[in-house]
Image (tube, rainbow, N blue to C red):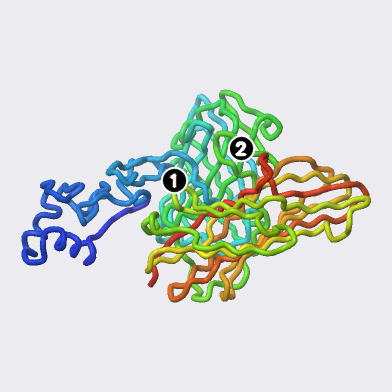
Amino acid sequence: MMIRARAATLAAALTCVLAYGASIPSRASAACSDGVLDPGEACDDGNRLDGDCCSSACSWEAAGSACGDDGERCTRDVCDGAGACVHDASPLTTCLVAPKGKLQISNDADDAKDKLILQMQNAPGLTPADFGDPTSSDGYRACLFGPDGLLMSAEISPGGTCEGKPCWAETTGGYTYKDKNATQDGLTLLALKASAKPKTKINAMGRGANLADAPLPFPAPVMAQIVNGSTGQCFETYFLEPAAVKRNTATDYDAKAAAPGFEIPGIADVIRQDDLAPGTPSPNGEEPRAAASGPDPTKVFVDSVTYAGNGCPDGSIVASLTPDRSGFVLLVDGFAASRGPGVPPTEATKSCQVNLDLKLPQGWQYSIGTIDHRGTVAIPKKMKATQRATYYFEGDGAFASADTTFAGPADKRYLIRDTLPFSSVSWSSCDERRPLTITTELHLKGGTEAGAISADTIDGKIAFVLGLRWRRCP
């Protein structure tokens, strides 16, 4: 269960004093949070610590701030910026994608015979530290989503004792939860195993009457997420009709993870994440946690964009912030590599390096969260097409990279989402502005017939959508 609390700060107290005049500090202190809505206050309920979206400065909490828990395990409880606490039951959008896995559910008339098996395999490379510490502080929840929202959920608390032994145990590669009695939402096992290579594994099992009844048959498609309730670190995989689903009846569901190359309507526009490999560790050696909210969105904007490479000639890139200011979009025109009879060898490799200078308020840092790459691949048998991306801040030794390879024959659109694990994230400098560099390469090899990989959408442009994480400077 996530615990959310908000304490009044000195800065907030000074805001109240200034609002009512520095010459009468006792009146100002009494007016803010005295339960009376006074002139200049957006809200005032007399309680600064109840998570109701009214801040200690008697103003509405910023959109995205944590608020009161509705008791549902898989909702995000956040303020909407206008005083309402919204309980969003949609999937998280920053999870690490496991391209392999399975989901099996039995919903028997006898609840004691209900079963659940969820496996996620080949998630990006991680360290055990990315799992947090479920032996003492980090609980986990399992969430299944359909196109219309949450289907079923289960949760495991940190720590605890199961049959006279600790429920959680630290292992060589991570952590394992075991409870033969299935006391917590019917879950008997949750195994978290990290790997430096893209072979991280997540396995969950459950059974019995404490397991939530699955609303079978499931709609198509289905998304499964395993979420650390404290840090927000999460993992996901997908199950699609009809090829990936073996059985979907009123009593049983059996499916394998969706094959790469399919977009998922109604749930997310993500199809996969490939081989994300952290580079050198962050300079300070810590594992950053996602901030609850970012700076004032009106103060964040792209200050400048420079780019170079044979894949992005002058005039081919346009950059803009996303509407909610949590990221920005790069539109790159004509970025493509080709290979085949009569095609010069130099056309088989194209690259583009983009330097983005983001302007933000003093006292804030940002890091790379998620980056989406869209395009088209059309290659014959025996040809391979590779899309490679590298991310780093100029002048910083930390970086992360990702490779995606398509094997021919293939003729389809693709969408790749690179999501960086918390432990590999590098943060922007608090002392000086350093551009964020994104280097993307398209490469073809093998085959004797014509083939191409391009970074373009239906309108002929590719959108690199970059999501950001925020935190305050130390």
Task: Report if residue 409 is visible in the image.
Answer: yes
**Crowd band around label 1 with a 10 angstrom C-alpha radius: few (<14), some (14–19), many (20+):** many
Q: Quadrant of the C terminus?
A: bottom left
Amino acid residing under circle 2: Ile
Image vertical order of residue 174 relative to residue 33, above or below = below
At x 18%, y 63%, the residue is: 13
Vertical order, 58 against 368 (above or below): above
Could you give the CA–CA distance between mark 2 and mark 1, rounded to whole angstroms? Answer: 25 Å
Q: Position of residue 12 (x, y in %)?
A: 22, 62
Label 2 SS: loop
- Would you say 459 lies left or right of 343 here? left
Residue 172 visible in the snapshot? no
The image quarter containing residue 392 is bottom right
Query: Tag 1 or tag 2, which sits nearer the N-term?
Result: 1
Please tell me which residue lies in front, 295 or 284: 295
What's the residue type where badge 1 is placed? Answer: Glu
Q: Which residue is mark 2?
A: 264
Q: Position of residue 219 (x, y in %)?
A: 56, 28
Q: Which mark is residue 155?
A: 1
Closest to the observer: 24 or 12? Answer: 24
**What is the x, y in percent for residue 462?**
65, 48
Which label belongs to residue 339? none
Q: Marks 2 and 1: CB-CB under 8 Å? A: no
Q: Is residue 174 above or below residue 236?
A: below
Q: Secondary structure at mark 1?
A: strand
Residue at far front of view: 315
Give the residue at x 64% y 63%: 307
Q: Residue at (47%, 57%) from the top-left corner?
A: 168
